[in-house]
Image (cartoon, rainbow, N blue to C red):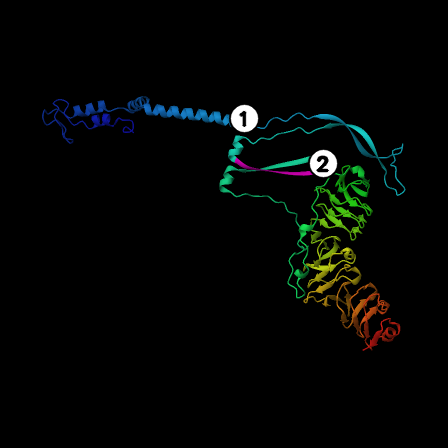
Amino acid sequence: MFRIFGFTDFYRGVELNKNCPKCGKEIPEEAAFCLNCFSPVGVRVAQKQKNKPSFFLLIRSSVSKIVKNRRFWLSLAGATVFLFVMGICIFVMKTFNSSPALKSPDTTIINVTETVALTESDGEAVTDENGEQVFEIVEITKALTLAPESTEKQGLLDKLFNDKTTENKNTTNTSQTEETTEKKGFWESLFGSDSTTQTETAVSSTQNSVENTQESSTKPSVTETATTPITTEPQTTEPVQTPVTDFEYTLSDKYATIKKYTGNATHVTVPAVIESKYVVRISSNTFQNNDTIETVTFESNSNQPYLWIESQTFNSCSNLRVINFPETDLGIINNFATNCLSVEKLSVTGYQFKYIDGTLYYNTGSTWKLRWHCPAHPTTTITLPNNCSGFESAINLKEARNVKNIYLSKNTMYFPSTNLLPPNCENVYVDDANPYGYDENGIAFQKSGSQYLCSYPPKNTTQSLTLPENSLIYAQHISNPYLKTLYIPGSANIQFEDSILNRSAFSALENLYIGSSHPKADYFLTNSEITNTQKY
C-alpha cells in the first residue's frame, strides 16, 4: 500500500537505518551496541520506533498524496461530465418516445334507420299469416360518438431496442376493433430467431382430410385430359357491406334466420349478426331467380356458433359466379345451389368441407363424399382422392358440362349412376385395385349384390360392346350416339328394355344380339326396331 501512494522510500529510510546515531558508524544487524563508540543499541531502536509512522499518519499521507495527484482529478472530472451527458440523453429519448394524448371524442347528430318489431296496443307482437313476427323500418335520430383518434409513434429507444413491430388487426364486428402489437427486441434480434404464434383449431383424430395426391393409375393418364389451370378461375372480389334492410329475416330468442334477399347488388355480403343476434340459417330460395348477383360472401364472425345453408338457397341465379362461405361450423345441404350454371368457384374452410378443383367434398364423420361440383369450373377431369368413398346420390354432375373424364380410386364404393353423369362425360375409369367394381373401355360397372350396375357415359365412343355377365342396366337413363353393336348375355338384367329396342338409348345401334338363355329373348326379337336383331 505504501508503494502505491509513493511512501516506500520514507518507510525504508526509518526501517532500514543501520548507522549509529552517535558516531554515524554502521552497526551490524545482530549487534546490541555500536562497535566504534560502544553506544547501546537502544538508542537506534528508540529512534526507529520514534520515526516509524502510525496507521493514522499513513492514511493522512495517502490522502494528501491523492489530493496532489493531477491525473486523478482529470479522470474524476471526465467521468462526471459523461454521466451528466448520458442523463440528458435518456431524458430526451424518453420524451420523444412517449405517445401523444388521445383526442377527445367527437359527437355528431345523425339520422339512421332501424328495424323494429310491430306490437299491438296491449304489447302483443304482430305476426303474419305464417305466425312469424313482423318488423318495420323506422327512421330515428341518434347522437353518434366517434372513437378518439390515437397516433402511436415509435421513439428513438424503440428504434434502438425494438427493431421489429408487427400489428395484427382482427375485426369481429362493425363496432369493435381489436389491435394487437407484437415486438421483437434488440437482444432477441441478436440471440433469438423470429417466433410466430399460430392458433390452430383442434380437429378430432377420427375425422379424415381430403388428400390431393393420387396413386398412379393403370388407366389412361390424367394428363391426356389435363385440367385447365386454376388461374383461370375468377378473381376474388372484395366484399361490399350490404345493408341489413336488403334482407327479410326472423328473430328468435338467440338467433336470426335470413328468409329473403330483396336487393339488386352485384356483390352481396350476408351479415353474420343482425340486431345483436347471430345468423344461423339461410332459408331455401333466399336468392331465388336473382339474375343480378355475381358474388355472394358470407361474413365471418368468430362467435357465430354455426351456419346452416338450406337446400336451394341459391336457385336459378343465372349470373352467380363465386360463393365465399364463412369460417364457422358450416352445414351445406345437398342441392344448395340448383340451376346456377355460371358458378365457377367456391371458397370454403373448416374440417367439414374441402374444395378441390371445382369439387366440394363433405366429411360424413367416417369418410368423405363428393357433394357438389361447380358447373362452370374449367376442369375436364374429376379424380377422386383415395380417402373419398364416392358420390352422394343428389350430386349435380348433370350440370358439370366441362367434365369429360372421371377417375375412381381403389377405395371408391359409390359410383355415379348413369342418370347423374355429366352431359359430356366420355369415360368413367375405375382403378384396377378397386374391389367394388371395374370398367370396360371407360364404361363402369359397380358391384351391387350379385349384379354389376352399369354407369354408361353419354359421350363414350365405344362402337361394339358385350355386356358382362350379371350386369344390370337402366336403359331409360342412357343416351349415347356412338354404339353400333350390342351383345346382351342371358344373365344380363335389362330394365326398360324398350329404350334399347326403339334406339332411344343408342341412337346409332345397328346390330343387337340377345343371348338365347335370356328370359326375354323372344320379346327382343318380336319388338326390336333394329333390323339385325338375333339370338346368339
In the structure shown, which secondary structural element does the residue marked by tag 1 occupy?
helix
Q: Quadrant of the N terminus?
A: top left
Number of callouts: 2
Q: Judge whether residue 381 can be spotted in this image.
A: yes
| Most common secondary structure along the magenta stretch | strand
Q: Position of residue 350 (x, y in %)?
A: 69, 49
Question: Which range of residues does the magenta coloring cover?
Answer: 162-173
- Asked whether, in this view, residue 435 is left or right of residue 310, the answer is left
Q: Position of residue 418 (x, y in %)?
A: 79, 63
Q: Judge whether residue 449 can be spotted in this image.
A: no
**Tags 1 and 2 in contact by the CB under 8 Å rule?**
no
- Residue of label 1: 95
- Asked whether, in this view, residue 297 is left or right of residue 100, the answer is right
Identified by mark 2, the residue type is: Thr
In the structure shown, which secondary structural element does the residue marked by tag 2 occupy?
loop
Specify the quadrant of the image occupied by residue 280: top right
In this view of the protein, which residue sits in the foreground, 364 or 402?
402
Position of residue 275 relative to residue 365, above or below, is above
Specify the quadrant of the image occupied by residue 295: top right
Specify the quadrant of the image occupied by residue 292: top right
Mark 2 neighbour class, 10 Å CA radius: few under 14, some 14 to 19, many 20 or more: few
Position of residue 417 relative to residue 199, above or below, is below
Q: Residue at x 71, y 64 (%)?
A: 429
Q: Earlier in the sequence, mark 1 or mark 2?
A: 1
- Residue of label 2: 174
Mark 1 neighbour class, 10 Å CA radius: few under 14, some 14 to 19, many 20 or more: few
Residue at the outermost left position: 36
Let me know if residue 92 is in the magenta part.
no
Position of residue 62 relative to residue 218, above or below, is above
Identified by mark 1, the residue type is: Thr
Mark pair 1, 2: CA separation: 36 Å
